[in-house]
Image: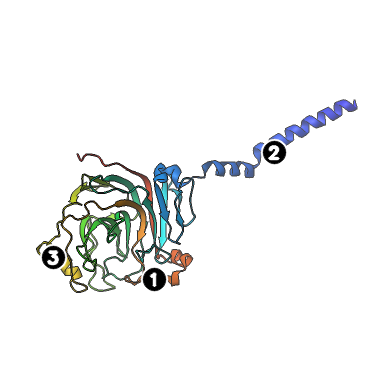
Amino acid sequence: MKKSIFTIFTLLLIVGCKNNTETNPEVTVENETEQEAKYPSDVIPFMDKWKILLGDGTYVDDLVDYQKDDFFYVENDGKTDWVVYKTPNSGITSRTSSNTRTELGEKAHWIPETGGKLTGTLKVQHVSTTGNADVASSYSVVVGQIHSDEGHENEPLKIYYKKFPGHTKGSVFWNYEINTEGDNSGRFDFSTAVWGYDFSVVGDDETTSPAEPEDGIALGEEFSYEVNVYKGIMCLTFTSEGHETITFTKSLIESDFATKADIPQQIIDNYASRRTVGVEREIAYAGEINYFKQGAYNQANGKSTKSETYDGDIEKQYANGSYAEVWFKSATVGSATPPN
């Protein structure tokens, strides 16, 4: 009889422990959290081809299974996982810029004649809400680049998103920076609108914005770009649902700005009062090493844009709108392809 009672007690104890484990909500939540945790490299698997500089100065060259809260991480909008790139107006940045970034830099390098291809599908969630309306770089973020790694280390391509305070729609445009002949003091960017305005459209004064662009892109509105550099020719394609698909071609091996007569009026109007405008070497970026960049390169550093930086306190900047935030749901990088 004693043996039977002991056996029954033991069985009840085992069953009770099993039931507690199955119904314990803390155990279930913990297991689900572990399973659902994702890194940017889980969402966009090309991260092994990149290094990154974050808005707090952190540099990392192995991005597989890497993330950092508040800068580079994964968010889900209820339907899709996105890689988030977030950076304040003021922080620690690279030696060649006063603008902060949480931005990928391609490990592979190439010359325009060999070329390469970069794509991205993204939505800009936030740009700085402080700045001067009559400064071209205020309220803007660069979401894709080609950067030179030789000579002047200029940028043959910067893809921008910009939205003035009070506007619902912002602008997407791209800039070409000349590979200046001689020293780099006469460098300039020529800007081309995709949807909305180009870089040169600013307010009449520091507090007055221009009219809202009719064909612009709103914060949170998805768009895509493709940058295909094939045999020295840069082919750009921009797409967004509800907007006209826009394409451009630009030679990176033969200059459009090699003489004073070639300088567009846009450049004269925007630069002549600040510096002597130079010309580009005839072969532009031919034979020069370049690489792609992608992410959030915040243009509102405070030094020139008069944006608020809260003495570089990142937490305060995030709390008060002094930051840029860009979400990518897909992207690719690789070899150039023949244009269609």
- What residue is drawn where x is 73% and y is 32%? 15
Badge 3 or badge 1: first in the primary sequence: 3
According to the image, label 1 marks what residue? 308
Q: Secondary structure at mark 3?
A: helix
Q: CA distance from mark 3 to mark 1?
A: 32 Å
The amino acid type, in three-letter code, at marker 1 is: Glu
Q: Position of residue 131 (x, y in %)?
A: 33, 69
Question: Can residue 80 be seen from the camera position used here?
Answer: no
Q: CA distance from mark 2 to mark 1?
A: 54 Å
Q: Is disc 2 surrounded by few (<14), some (14 to 19) or many (20+) residues within 10 Å?
A: few
* Front in this rendered view, residue 314 or 210: 314
36 left or right, relative to 210 = right
* Front in this rendered view, residue 21 or 248: 248
Q: Quadrant of the C terminus?
A: top left
According to the image, label 3 marks what residue? 265
Q: Is disc 1 surrounded by few (<14), some (14 to 19) or many (20+) residues within 10 Å?
A: many
